[in-house]
Image (cartoon, helix red, strand yellow):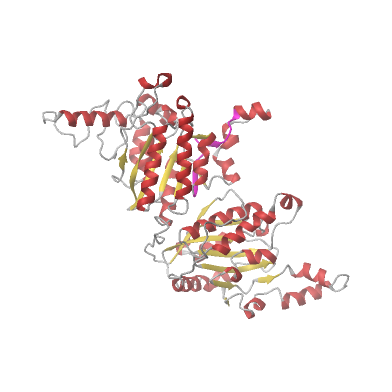
Amino acid sequence: MPPLPFAAAASSSLAGVGGTAAPSGVACSPQLSEGVDSSPSAPAAHVFKQPSVIELERLQAEALKGGGFERIRKQHKQGKLTARERIMTLLDPGSFEELDMLVQHRCRDFGMGETQIAGDGVVTGSGTINGRLVFVFSQDFTVFGGSLSETHASKIVKIMEKAMRVGAPVIGINDSGGARIQEGVVSLAGYANVFQLNVLASGVIPQLSLIMGPCAGGAVYSPALTDFVAMTRGTAYMFVTGPDVVKQVTFEDVTRDELGGADVQSKSGVVHLAYDNELDALARIRDLFDFLPLSNQHAPPLRPNFDPPNRVSPSLDFAVPRDPNTAYDMVEIIEQVVDDGELFEVQTGFARNIIIGFARLEGGTVGVVANQPKEQAGCLDINASIKGARFVRFCDAFNIPILTFVDVPGFLPGTEQEHNGIIRQGAKLLYAYAEATVPKLTVITRKAYGGAYDVMSSKHLRGDANYAWPSAEIAVMGAKGASEILHRGHVDIEALTAEYTRKFANPYSAAQLGYVDAVIMPRDTRKVLCKEMARLRNKKLANPWKKHDNMPL
């Protein structure tokens, strides 16, 4: 994990704001000590300042206080950073440039006209992560509970529009009590304006969300529309209706954490990443950002690579057990193939029978999708299909090549799956792979049975490079089941199963038909994939023009 650029500053703030300094490193703003500029670079008291400069410094100092030192203390006591501290920890030191620092709400009802706080509960602007541009907004719970007003929403919309114009990702940090009740339907309109920008930006720029406090009601739909959602345990929660409403309607007693905590929403698939504290979450979002292109007009980032592309891994020759019913961990295989053994896996708490995440080959980002044999034998089910499809479409939208590892015995059978729409849901993954135009590389390690073989980035779905290990079994179904159907009532099923295996349950029939490009030694997998990726770097493929598709949602 890379060092946190502002961990020290954040830690010192946590130790005691106590009416002294605001978070260090805030661009264009002096440090505070009860409104007095006490930074080392502060001009001497005798230096003359224009009244207009003094007024600007006063306004900036007031804005930096947020909801005041007492509310900041309370935020820290809960183990939470302030809105600005989060931004300073996330971005490169000194890179943040704030926009709309002095914006105030326009509400005059319910005494709101007498309560004006600059910034109106959200800090917005831009900066860099490892030198690359990013736009950010961070809701400030110390100001009106971070509630969303008309002006609060307009600040978020402004930076999202600017991010789309210049081609840069947006990272939103959510810590809000919801819509500002005093503004009524105007605050609801603000949410809708943000949702509209989330939709317009989808597939144009990467959108990342961090949930670091309350996120309830309509507020949950903005993160849900973004590409990746991270959440902190213990201090954050997400739900459409809270515990009180649930109790009134269903008579269930449930806590906020039980209803919408990080672990609960990880299992539901809403949250991609869950962390124990904010510093961890912010550091890992920096790592995720490093894999992503700035926009759909940019290539994925390429970083220096010192892992030889022709490196062989002899242990892979023994990675797949001889017994076809014995499980193994596909993550271990992936880590031996990709650069430096680094796989940034996402959605680990949801649909564990499929793996998705980012890695690199020769320094370039690849999206990895893989069946996980140690979970439900790697079968595709409803949740795995949804999880895989969304990830494949993200990679395709942002020009990220897709690397697929296959060990799939088929779709999960049963009435529960059928009654909940496995046909429609499974078609989503098929559709995602079929429409993808980025380079698609596939390695079949063991089983590739039935329709699931087709779905998992097969040659028939415009796969660019399809390889199989000698242990691969590419067939309509398993040898034993096929033999029992073909030779029903025959006494020597074992011998017939062995014959079927020899003829069909292997990679060579598919290789003879050109459905796999080569049967490769497992130890050579990295070498083969790196060479093929280099060949595919300038691939060009376009789908027929359409207003939009109509995938089976």
Q: Is residue 262 visible?
A: yes
Residue at 53% in and 34% down: 216
Residue 524 vertical position relative to residue 336 in the rendered view, above or below: below
Counting the numbered discs, the total is 0
Residue 332 vertical position relative to residue 280 in the rendered view, above or below: below
Displayed quadrant of residue 427: bottom right
Displayed quadrant of residue 193: top left
Q: Is residue 275 visible?
A: no
Q: Is residue 229 magenta?
A: yes
The answer to whether 536 appears left or right of 410 in the picture is left
Residue at 58% in and 61% down: 370
Q: Is residue 118 magenta?
A: no
Taking depth in this image into account, of 451 and 41 the one nearest to the observer is 451
Magenta span covers which residues? 227-243
Taking depth in this image into account, of 295 and 341 the one nearest to the observer is 295
The answer to whether 408 appears left or right of 367 in the picture is right
Q: Could you say where residue 401 lies in the image, as x and y percent from the top left?
A: 48, 64
Q: Could you say where residue 318 lies in the image, as x and y percent from the top left?
A: 60, 69
Q: Could you say where residue 327 lies in the image, as x and y percent from the top left?
A: 66, 61
Displayed quadrant of residue 513: bottom right
Residue at 44% in and 54% down: 204
Taking depth in this image into account, of 247 and 102 the one nearest to the observer is 102
Q: Could you say where residue 334 lies in the image, as x and y percent from the top left?
A: 53, 63
The answer to whether 396 appears left or right of 424 in the picture is left
